Amino acid sequence: MSAVRRHPLIAFFVLAYAFSWWPWHLYALGLSLPSPILGFGPFLAAVLVLALSGGKAAVMILLRRMVRWRVAGLWYAAALLLPVAIALGATVLNVLLGARPPSSAELGTWPSLIPTYFLYLLIPGISGAWEEPGWRGYALPNLQAGRSALSASLILGVV
């Protein structure tokens, strides 16, 4: 625990990779093992390091920052609807440029994408979104202490 308190950022990186990549040797041997922890590795590492180095209060600060609304609701709506608009626009442009229009069978599957889309939004662990609170919520602010945002981002990108 004292090593985590002395070097929390290094402990975070080691734990993030350990939690995320622990079954690599099993995959190399051809064994497939479903592991729900893989997408949560950086988040779990951040929570563990914060709990060991700063206690419950430090963990609560990270969790509160994760749900803080920073812009108007209009921008959240735009972010949610933009992928749909891009897909529809690409389909229309594709047809206008001479491609075959989607068949009714192909269009019939589109409504089933709506629940899937919202499932990925509501359960971010499925899509790997739980990595961000670890990398950008914990590691990046710690790297920015004493560094510019650019150099901290470059270091984080390499790591």
Image: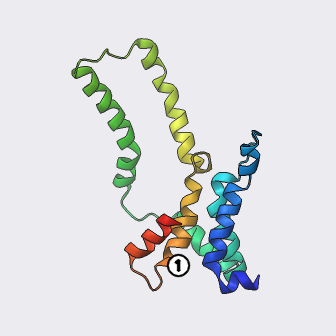
Q: Residue 152 falls in which quadrant of the image?
A: bottom left
Along the horizontal axis of the image, is 27 left or right of 132?
right
- Residue under pointer 1: 142
34 over 15 or under it: above or below: above
Amino acid residing under circle 1: Asn
Residue positioned most to the left: 97
74 over 98 or under it: above or below: below
- Report helix, strand or loop for mark 1: helix
Q: Give the residue displayed 74% in from the left and 50% down from the top.
A: 25
Q: Label 1: few (<14), some or many (≥20) within 10 Å? A: some
Q: Give the residue displayed 53% in from the left and 78% down from the top.
A: 142
Q: Residue 34 falls in which quadrant of the image?
A: top right
40 over 30 or under it: above or below: below
The C terminus: image quadrant: bottom right
Residue 50: image location, x then y, percent:
66, 76
Q: Give the residue displayed 49% in from the left and 33% down from the top.
A: 114
Residue 143: image location, x then y, percent:
50, 77
The answer to which of 133 and 148 lies nearer the viewer is 148
The answer to which of 149 and 50 lies nearer the viewer is 149
Residue positioned most to the front: 29
* Figure colour scheme: rainbow
Residue 57: image location, x then y, percent:
65, 79
Q: Give the residue displayed 70% in from the left and 80% down from the top.
A: 4
105 over 4 or under it: above or below: above
The N terminus: image quadrant: bottom right
Q: Residue 60 falls in which quadrant of the image?
A: bottom right
